Image: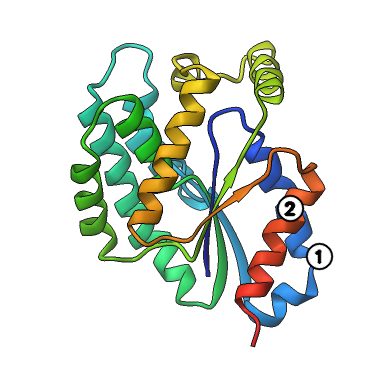
Amino acid sequence: MFIVIEGMDNSGKTTLINYLKKSLLNNPLIFEKFSKIHFTSEPYGPEEFKEKFSELSSPIFSNSYSLSPVTESLLFLAIRAEHLRKFIKPKLEENSLLICDRYFLSTLAYQSHLKGVSCEWLSSNMKFISEGFSPNLVFIVNVSEEDWKTFTNNKRIKKQLNKLDCLSSSYRELSEAYKWASEKLIELGENVINIPSTFSLEEKAQFIINKIVEINKG
């Protein structure tokens, strides 16, 4: 089963995934259905492929020059093609539960809505590299403006902001981008589920686990 967890930069998404990891590994219901649980992310890939994926993604995060939105999109798609063939599909063939931090929805939000790359062009290329394969569930981690500002400031203090974080749009622009991208993904037939911003960290994790268990009943 392929689960994607999406959310704008500084939404608390990665913190949620780290918490979810511990919760899933301690949940016997999950292991009744799946042989293993794997975690990965885009554009960084799984732990065992981080060095190789870093070589592919380094131009995106380089501070020495700026890529055009189309070039940036092509690099993200190239990374995703490798990710699918070398890790995602092989792990799913082993009856694994695979959780991915970001996927195509983020591409639509950032590269299409915010940077103007054609949605149709991106969708066509995505269909080609994925061969029609798509996630079972896509969760969007919603965040209030107040919490978003707190998370952003904390990362700035810790100097954890990368080049793309530093160029981030406003909260309103990011919210609009993710809303638009989620609607596009639904139009493409994907199962998109919003996680309320009012939920606590524990409630968000349990919400995801409940949906995974629910879809695998029977």
Q: Position of residue 89 (x, y in %)?
A: 40, 67
Question: Residue sitting at 63 percent across and 66 percent down?
Answer: 37
Tally of marks: 2
Image position of 136 (left or right of 201): left
Which quadrant does the C terminus fall into? bottom right
Q: Circle 1: is it few (<14), some (14-19), or many (20+) Cα within 10 Å?
A: few
Residue at disc 1, secondary structure: loop
Q: Image point 27% across, 35% down: which residue?
A: 73
**13 left or right of 150 in image:** left
Observer-nearest of 64 and 20: 20
Observer-nearest of 155 and 140: 140
The residue sitting at 58% across, 61% down in the picture is 38
Q: Amino acid at mark 2?
A: Ala
For label 1, the residue is: 26
In the image, which disc is placed on residue 205?
A: 2
- Residue 186 lies in quadrant: bottom left
